[in-house]
Structure formats: C-alpha cells, structure tokens
C-alpha cells in the first residue's frame, strides 16, 4: 500500500510537471501559429521605414513601435523606482527592525501584495484627480502616474523576496563578519547582500514581468490608444498590453487580430530581453560585490 | 608547559553577578569570577547548557539573538584600563576587534585565503597593501598555516581541508592582534591529527592573548588548559587542571 502511494506520488509529480510544460508549449505554439504571420516590420512600424522610425525621423501611426517603446520606458521607470525602495525596505525588515515592527509591516506588505491591480490603478487615478483639483491643476493621468502606481504594485514582491533572501542566510555566515568587528552595515553590504543577490534578482524579475504585463493599472492612470512615442513623463503613452487588450476587444478584421497575436509575441520577447538584462546585472553586481570584499 | 597557579595571575577579565536568560530559562546563574591574562581557561560541561553563550558574553555576539536577556557586569582590561564592555560608551566593532572569536565549524568566507585573513583589516578601514600583506603573513604564520598556503594565497579558501580552514579562521581572528581569543569547540569538527596541530597552536598563542575555550574533550582540555571550569546548572565549578 505504502509503495503504491510512493509510486503514485512520483507519477503525480511527473504528470503535474509535464502538464505545466505542456501548457506553456501549447500557449507559445498557439501564439506563434496565430501571430507569426504578422511578425514583420509592418507590424512594428506600419509603412514607415524602420530606420526612419528608430531614428525618430518619422512618426509611426500604423505599427506598434510606440507601444513597444512605451512599455519599455514604463517598465524601466517603475522598476527603477520600485527596486531601490523595495530592497531598502527588505534590508530594513530583515536586518534592522524589531520583531514586532517586522510582523506589523509584514501584514501591511501582504495586504498590498494581495491588492488587485485594478484597485491600485483606481487608487493612482483618484490621487491624480485629487492632486489635479487641489495642488497641481496641470497634472493628468500620465506616464509618471502609471509608473508610480506600478511601482506600488510590485513593491511587496521586492520587499518580501529581499527579506526572505536575507533571512535565509545561515546563522553561521551571518555572525562571521560581526565577530570580526564588522558594523551592521558592513555585514549587510559585504557579506549578506552579495549572498542574497540571487533571491533579490528573482524578485526583480517577477517585478519586471508584472510591470510589463499589467493592463488594469495603466488603463486608469495614463495609457492611451494612440499617443505616439512616449514624449514626456507628464503625458499619455502607448503600451503593449493595452494594445493587445483593445485589439482583442474591438478588432475590425482578421489582420488586426493577427496583429494582436503578433504584439503578444513581442511582449514575450521584450520580457525575455529584460529578464536577460537583469541576469546580466546580477552577475555584474555579484562580481563587484565580491571584488569589493576581496580587493 | 608553563602553569602558574591561578592565584598569582593577573586578571584580564572580571565577571560580576552574571545571569543570562533565554526567554524564561536561566542559563547562567549569578556567576562571579575572573580570567587570568595569558592563560588558557577551558569551559567544560554538558552540551546545551550555555557554554557557547557564556563565550559570546565577552564579545556581545549574543545581542542579535531575539528573546535573550543578560544582567551583571563584565569588564576587560585593555592595556591598563578596565573597560565595562556593556557600558553605553563601548564601541562594539572596536570591542570585537580586540576580542576575537573562532567557531565550532570553520567559517571561511567565499573568497581567497589572503582576502579572508585581510577581511577584518579591511573592515577596520586599513588600506595600505604593504601593511595588509605583512599582517596577513604574520597572522598566517602565527596560526601555523603560512608554510602550507604561502604559494596559493589567491586560491579559494573553501578548498582548504577542515583543519586548514579552522587555522585560517584562527589567523583571521589573530590578524587584528586581539587581546582575548574566544574559541567555541575549535577542534570538534576535525580529525585527531588536525586537532593536535590546533592544540599545539593554542599553547603557543597564549603568549599573545588570553584564551577562553569551550571544549567537550576532557583529554584535550587537560593537555592545553591552565584552568578548567565546568558549567553546570548555570554555575561555574572549578576542576583540577
């Protein structure tokens, strides 16, 4: 009986693993099948020559180039707002704050993590409207508001992964540097953070993915269907998920729908590029952190 | 072996009414004693009864553990000045530079041999490469490790054998020239030969510093210690050395 259960567990685990892989393969296959045909320079740039579009000599109206640029800029801004704050908060929680505060703050971060993105978007929208009516009459939903709202959306992941990565460091390693006269910050910066970097980067990758795919937040805080390339932090912008959303809900013909699938493939490619970038940064940081501890 | 009777020695550390609590559990119960300069004092006793805790009282390393409490006074004489190490004015990193500690399991950092030993110097803000190289060599010599590693100082420290790693950790603790050295079962993860090298090393080291060591091995303690004290029921009981 016991051996049967053992066997079933193993088989079950394999089935689940394969089902997951299969689901991803089916998803990717379906996307490629539907969208590969539309993947050409017309999808990105319409009838404008790619070189002209990339050098900003001519505006693109037909293609999704402005949406790609918008998403890229949006992700970069929100992640560079959220990552320093998230890592700093994670370090504080894991290394500095008293246990009581840690519990209380932890609950708040969990609530924030569980907040649906549409609520975050609505919050960003409300704050913008409030500011518009009171302090900043020229403020409208815009790139900056979206980026800030997205930063709030991903902050809890960053905080929690940083905190967990630091707290997971074994006690033996944790007390090595203090026993040798390290201050708390020296211990954090020279021993603990380099050790926790892998975990922190995983949190960052999660955050990048979340910023690139989220539609609910940006819909309420500044994305528009045809704004052209992002021009200013205080203006509207286009974004890929929003493009996919509008196309899928109101496409006029088969070609436009195929463009939607093409855009979905582009989002995946964009995320892959951003992930690779963060891996690259991690290995750089790891080498530098090591280099600083061992000059 | 140079074994002066305890009553003629010059005290280095004094402990007054030291009590230590884990939650509601009293690990150390109103201990008052002193430890002689340039002596090896061994603390023996059953495990899990607070011997390691007692060691961390002298470099305040227990303070990061949540839910513990200490009362009493601990003073260490640095040069000719007695310092209350729990006084608010005490500089914690500076204290730990003068009171080194070596743990039960060797804990080299994931870096080269030379950089491991230089690490405390860097933490203390030393920058001159010549000075660092000289002090690293001195520390490695003092820890009986120089001859074995002088040709591969840039090799990864985690590649060394267990005994070598432990001597590396001793060298790393010695590089700041501490006046007190705390050793928490320094040989319990090593084989007999490697442990023998370290025992020999400790006897040499007491010329440089005052050594407090926790050990399980009574025969080892009898070989190296000038004074043996047993921690039982939160109290220290003297044993014949």
Image (tube, helix red, strand yellow):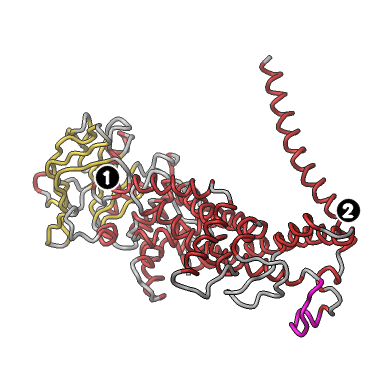
Q: Residue at x 71, y 29 (%)?
A: A10
Q: Are marks 1 and 2 in contact (CB under 8 Å)?
A: no
Question: In the rendering, at what x and y percent does residue A73 appear?
Answer: 64, 70
Range of residues picked out in magenta = A51-62
Label 2, on which residue? A33
Q: Magenta region's main secondary structure? A: loop
Gap in angstroms between the C-alphas marked 1 and 2: 68 Å
Farthest-out residue, front = A133
Q: Is residue B153 visible?
A: no
- Chain containing mark 1: B
Camera-side mark, 1 or 2: 2
**Quarter of the image where one finds residue A201:** bottom right
Q: Crowding at label 1, few (<14), some or many (≥20) Cα neighbours within 10 Å?
A: many
Give residue B55's mark. 1
Q: Is residue B151 above or below residue B4?
A: below
Classify residue B65 as left or right of residue A111: left
Q: Residue at x 86, y 76 (%)?
A: A47
Work out whether disc 1 and disc 2 sit on a shared chain. no
Report the quarter where the C terminus of chain B lies: top left
Q: B220 or A174: which is nearer to us?
A: A174
Instruction: Tell me if residue B113 is in the magenta stretch.
Output: no
């Amino acid at each position: 009986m016991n051996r049967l259960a053992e066997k079933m567990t193993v088989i079950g685990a394999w089935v689940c693993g394969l089902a997951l892989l299969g689901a991803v393969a089916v998803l990717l296959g379906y996307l490629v099948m539907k969208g590969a045909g539309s993947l050409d320079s017309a999808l990105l740039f319409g009838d404008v020559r790619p070189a002209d579009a990339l050098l900003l000599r001519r505006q693109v109206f037909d293609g999704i180039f402005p949406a790609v640029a918008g998403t890229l800029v949006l992700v970069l801004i929100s992640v560079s707002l959220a990552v320093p704050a998230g890592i700093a908060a994670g370090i504080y929680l894991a290394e500095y704050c008293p246990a009581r505060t840690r519990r209380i703050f932890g609950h708040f971060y969990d609530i924030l993590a569980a907040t649906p993105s549409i609520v975050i978007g609505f919050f960003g929208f409300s704050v913008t409207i409030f500011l518009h009516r009171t302090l900043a009459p020229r403020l409208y939903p815009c790139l900056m508001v979206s980026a800030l709202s997205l930063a709030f959306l991903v902050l809890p992941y960053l905080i929690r992964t940083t905190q967990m990565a630091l707290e997971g460091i074994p006690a033996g390693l944790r007390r090595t540097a203090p026993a040798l006269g390290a201050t708390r910050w020296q211990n954090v910066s020279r021993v603990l953070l380099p050790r926790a970097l892998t975990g922190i980067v995983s949190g960052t990758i999660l955050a990048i993915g979340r910023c690139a795919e989220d539609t609910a937040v940006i819909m309420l805080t500044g994305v528009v269907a045809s704004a052209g390339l992002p021009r200013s932090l205080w203006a509207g912008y286009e974004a890929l998920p929003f493009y996919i959303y509008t196309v899928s809900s109101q496409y006029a013909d088969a070609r436009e729908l195929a463009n939607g699938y093409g855009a979905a493939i582009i989002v995946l490619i964009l995320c892959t590029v951003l992930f690779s970038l963060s891996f690259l940064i991690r290995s750089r940081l790891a080498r530098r952190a090591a280099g600083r501890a061992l000059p | 072996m140079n074994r002066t009777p305890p009553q003629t020695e010059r005290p280095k550390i004094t402990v007054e009414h030291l009590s230590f609590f884990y939650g509601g559990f009293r690990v150390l119960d109103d201990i008052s004693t002193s430890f002689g300069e340039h002596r090896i004092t061994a603390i023996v006793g059953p495990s899990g009864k607070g011997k390691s805790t007692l060691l961390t009282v002298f470099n305040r390393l227990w303070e990061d553990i949540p839910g513990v409490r200490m009362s009493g006074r601990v003073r260490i004489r640095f040069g000719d000045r007695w310092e209350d190490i729990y006084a608010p004015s005490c500089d914690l990193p500076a204290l730990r530079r003068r009171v080194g500690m070596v743990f039960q399991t060797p804990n080299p950092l994931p870096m080269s041999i030379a950089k491991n030993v230089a690490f405390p110097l860097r933490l203390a803000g030393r920058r001159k490469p010549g000075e660092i190289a000289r002090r690293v060599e001195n520390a490695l010599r003092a820890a009986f490790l120089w001859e074995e590693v002088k040709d591969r100082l840039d090799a990864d420290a985690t590649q060394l054998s267990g005994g070598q790693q432990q001597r590396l950790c001793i060298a790393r603790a010695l590089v700041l020239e501490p006046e007190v050295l705390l050793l928490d079962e320094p040989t319990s993860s090593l084989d007999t030969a490697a442990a023998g090298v370290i025992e020999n090393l400790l006897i040499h080291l007491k010329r440089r510093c005052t050594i407090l060591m926790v050990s399980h091995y009574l025969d080892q303690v009898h070989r190296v210690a000038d004074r043996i004290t047993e921690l039982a029921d939160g109290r220290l009981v003297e044993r014949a050395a």
